[in-house]
Structure formats: structure tokens, C-alpha cells
Image (cartoon, rainbow, N blue to C red):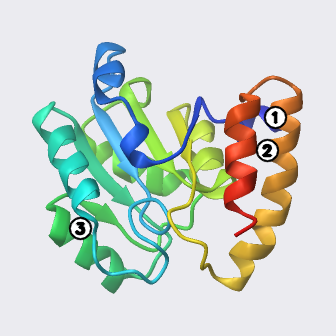
């Protein structure tokens, strides 16, 4: 079970994702989470750096798709702002929204990346579909009450992944420090 929770990469933010490296490895599609990945939970304004990253990804030839458990209205606003397709109310980590995203992207699982901030939704769902998974640190500290509870378990898993050598000690330390705010 632990392998399903282990990301292929653990980075500080979306801006740390190396698009050239992904392209050179043959990845053509990117599935993005919204809350605490692109925007703080309940946040509305996309940062200039995020907009620039999305434009760079498009210019590099990546197909992008948002897949979020958030409500449709919020997902549509972000989708329209970024001019990329989206799946709302996804109920990740179910496989269905990831299959839908692959269809929208026109990519196979072997050429698709998932980027998100949660082990139990983004990483678990992506790994179940054999996608390349990148866990990033949350962009904000405010979250739903249920998510705050899940984060406690997530911290334990991060420590275990680090002890077993699946993620670096530095990534684990950074990730655990962000949750203490």
C-alpha cells in the first residue's frame, strides 16, 4: 500500500517542476490539482508566477487539464482563467476522473504527470493509474476541517517514506515544516 502513496517527485512548489526534464522523458500531458496547488483554498487570484508557468507549459507543447474535488463553479472559474479543460467534483482518488483527464488530454498514462499537494487524493489517484506523480507543498495553510485531519496521517506517511528512502530527508523536512504554520 505504501507504494501507492509514494510520489515520483516531492517538490516545494509548482514553480519547481522542471518542464524540460518532463518533456525529455516523454511526458506530454499534465493533470493539475487546484486547491493548495495552484491557489490557496478559497483563494481566487492566480499569482502571476503560476500564470507564467502554465503559459510556459503550453508553449512547451504540454496538454493541461485541471482535476479537482472542488465545486464546479470554482473549477470553471479557474479553468476559464487558464484556458484549459477541467473536471470538477472529481472525488479523487477514484480512477474515473483521471481516466476522463487522460481522454481530454489525448495522452496515455505513460506520458502523463499529476501534480498536487495531497498524498491521499492526487498522489494515490495518480499512482493507481500508473501516472508520474509530483507532490508539491501546499501553497496555503487554510484547509477544510476534514483535510486538516487527513494531513495528520499524511505527515506520518511522509516520515515513513523518508525513513525508507522513498523521498529525500530534505523534502520530508521541508514538507513537514510547512504543515506546522
Residue 17 x, y percent position in the rendering = 40, 36
Residue 83 x, y percent position in the rendering = 14, 61
Whichever of callouts 1 and 3 sits on the residue coming sooner in the sequence is: 3
Question: Dot 1: what SS?
Answer: helix
Q: Report whether residue 104 is seen.
A: no
Instruction: State how far apart marks 2 and 1 are (Cα).
Output: 5 Å
Foreground disc of the pair 2, 3: 2
Name the side, left or right, on which 96 lies relative to 85: right
Name the side, left or right, on which 166 lies relative to 97: right
Q: Do labels 2 and 1 touch, CB within 8 Å?
A: yes
Tag of residue 161 = 1
Q: Vertically, is 81 above or below 173?
A: below
Whichever of callouts 2 and 3 sits on the residue coming sooner in the sequence is: 3
Instruction: State how far apart marks 1 and 3 are (Cα).
Output: 33 Å
Q: Quadrant of residue 107?
A: top left
Residue at 46% x, 42% y is: 114
As drawn, which residue projects farthest toward the left? 59
Q: Vertically, is 5 above or below 94?
A: above
Question: Dot 3: what SS?
Answer: helix
Tag of residue 158 = 2
Crowdedness of circle 2 by 10 Å Cα count: few (<14), some, many (20+)? Answer: many
Residue 111 x, y percent position in the rendering = 37, 25
Query: Which of the pair 165/98 is nearer the observer?
Result: 165
Amino acid at each position: 500500500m505504501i507504494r501507492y502513496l509514494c510520489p515520483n517527485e516531492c517538490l516545494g512548489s509548482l514553480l519547481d517542476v522542471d518542464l524540460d526534464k518532463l518533456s525529455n522523458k516523454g511526458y506530454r500531458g499534465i493533470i493539475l490539482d487546484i486547491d493548495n496547488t495552484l491557489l490557496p483554498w478559497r483563494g481566487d487570484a492566480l499569482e502571476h508566477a503560476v500564470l507564467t508557468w502554465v503559459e510556459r507549459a503550453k508553449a512547451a507543447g504540454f496538454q493541461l487539464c485541471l482535476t479537482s474535488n472542488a465545486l464546479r463553479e470554482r473549477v470553471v472559474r479557474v479553468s476559464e482563467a487558464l484556458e484549459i479543460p477541467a473536471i470538477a467534483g472529481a472525488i479523487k482518488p477514484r480512477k474515473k476522473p483521471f481516466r476522463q483527464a487522460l481522454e481530454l488530454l489525448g495522452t496515455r498514462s505513460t506520458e502523463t504527470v499529476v501534480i498536487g499537494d495531497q498524498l491521499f487524493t492526487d498522489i494515490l489517484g495518480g499512482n493507481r493509474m500508473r501516472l508520474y506523480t509530483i507532490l508539491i507543498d501546499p501553497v496555503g495553510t487554510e484547509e477544510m476541517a476534514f483535510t486538516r485531519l487527513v494531513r495528520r496521517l499524511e505527515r506520518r506517511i511522509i516520515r515513513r517514506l523518508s525513513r525508507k528512502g522513498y523521498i529525500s530527508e530534505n523534502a520530508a523536512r521541508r514538507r513537514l515544516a510547512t504543515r506546522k504554520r
